[in-house]
Amino acid sequence: MKIMKKRSLHLLGGALLSTLALSVSAAVSPEEAAKLQTTLTPMGAERAGNASGTIPEWTGGMATDAAAVDGDGFFADPFAGEQPLYTVTAANMDQYAELLTAGQKAMMQRYPDTYKLRVFQSNRSATVPQEVFDAVARNAVNTRLAEGGNGLENFDTAYPFPIPQSGVEVIWNHITRYRGGSFERVIAQATPQANGSNTMVILQDAFSFATALTDYGPKISDNLMFYFTQRILSPSRLAGDVLLVHENINQFKEPRAAWMYNAGQRRVRRAPQVAYDGPAFSADGTRVSDNYDLYNGSPDRYDWKLVGKRELLIPYNNFAIASRELKYDDIIQQGHINQDLVRYEVHRVWEVEATLKEGQRHVYAKRHFFIDEDNWQAGEIDHYDGRGGLWRVAEAIALQRFDLKIPGYALETLYDLQNGRYMALGMTNEERKNYDFSFEASSADFTPNALRAAGIR
């Protein structure tokens, strides 16, 4: 595993920076940042547990030897012997209403016999390497928003705003969160029909933050955040298609660059539609581009309101559903994934409300984000259509990759309340190898010229 090299991202020229000096947000004071060593964790969460005892104190996160890890990167379950404390269903959800999102309630109402939340003892397992903690401390006093929140200045490694002052700062923590520098993986995606029928899509991903490249240097733009490629391995009708993304930090200044290779045509084309509410690659219409990773891309089309913090039931420590012993058919069911395999815990989350700006367009007019305070990952997101109706419910089935100190997902889901379909992305159960964090990435691996070779069957 590689830790990203330190860098500062100066996105604006000196003259323009002077012009905008009064409009950018201020970093917190050294006195405020000192709380990251006392009452707050090094990532900005509250160290203390809650008054009721359902959320424990943070004591450093999960140990790197918490359970066995096999040679292909699959985990044993550190919590295998635990039983649920209680289960929330359509019949008793009013009793737990304060711990539920509107989307969770809607799912129980739509699937009253099968959709449930099995609630276990909370474990604050999230942690990252010390080098990342050190970068977060620097960010607290140095990083600022630029151009109405659409870019970052003086950003280092991950988590620019451990003590956020606005909704968009919370969102930037999710977008830039630590994911191990660079990795490869082979995963499965399911997009079942309302009747449960499904054809599994197998995908091969490669990801690298710009600063984790083996040839990182002056030739790499300071505005580049990461590279990403996704190749379809099966089914045969789609196999060989490849997506390439160059993700920029300030996409208002320099939009995301994307290309697609179509194996049938054997051609590489620019793909400007791979952003915002453009159709998502290989998703059969079940999501839009910025639904990937629960949320990704530029925040410029929304106004972001920081509602505050609350306690919520979110998926956490989901090692059971990542077991190599499971088959995909054990997970994928009609209407939603198998909730008997999902572990929920009470955690504190940041609530952020996103409202589409006047004059902008997007299929989601409003979104409610619920982002875990310990790892800054979105745990739940409710999506509303232009008429104000709750449309889609996103959920991250989270786990801590404890051996490498990387917070992550076992899979992500997006449920459509209107047509009964859903998407489940990220399953590795039947694959030969889990995430490979020893992946040595070069910028040459992420060029349009590399797409055609990657797509040959």
Image (tube, rainbow, N blue to C red):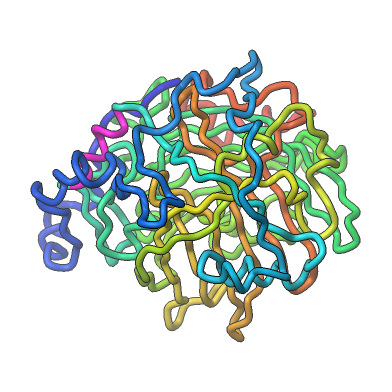
| Residue 322 position in % (x across, y down) | 68, 34
| Residue 313 position in % (x across, y down) | 54, 57
Q: Quadrant of residue 109?
A: bottom right
Please say whether residue 210 is visible from this viewpoint: no
Q: Residue at x 43, y 34 (%)?
A: 209
Q: Residue at x 46, y 46 (%)?
A: 247
In the rendered view, would you say 224 is above or below 32? Answer: above
Query: In the shown orientation, is residue 198 left or right of residue 30?
Result: right
User: Looking at this rendering, what residue extends furthest in the top direction?
Assistant: 71
| Residue 75 position in % (x across, y down) | 62, 25
| Residue 233 position in % (x across, y down) | 77, 34
> In the image, which residues are magenta?
131-140
Quadrant of the rendering where the N terminus is positioned = top left
Q: Looking at the picture, tell me which residue is in the foreground, 351 or 229.
A: 351
Q: Quadrant of residue 157?
A: top left
Q: Looking at the picture, tell me which residue is in the foreground, 140 or 279.
A: 140
Q: Residue at x 44, y 41 (%)?
A: 124
In the rendered view, would you say 282 is above or below 323? Answer: below
Q: Looking at the picture, tell me which residue is in the foreground, 232 or 449.
A: 232
Please say whether residue 13 is visible from this viewpoint: yes
Q: Majority secondary structure of the magenta segment? A: helix
Residue 280 in magenta? Answer: no
Query: In the shown orientation, is residue 184 left or right of residue 419?
Result: left
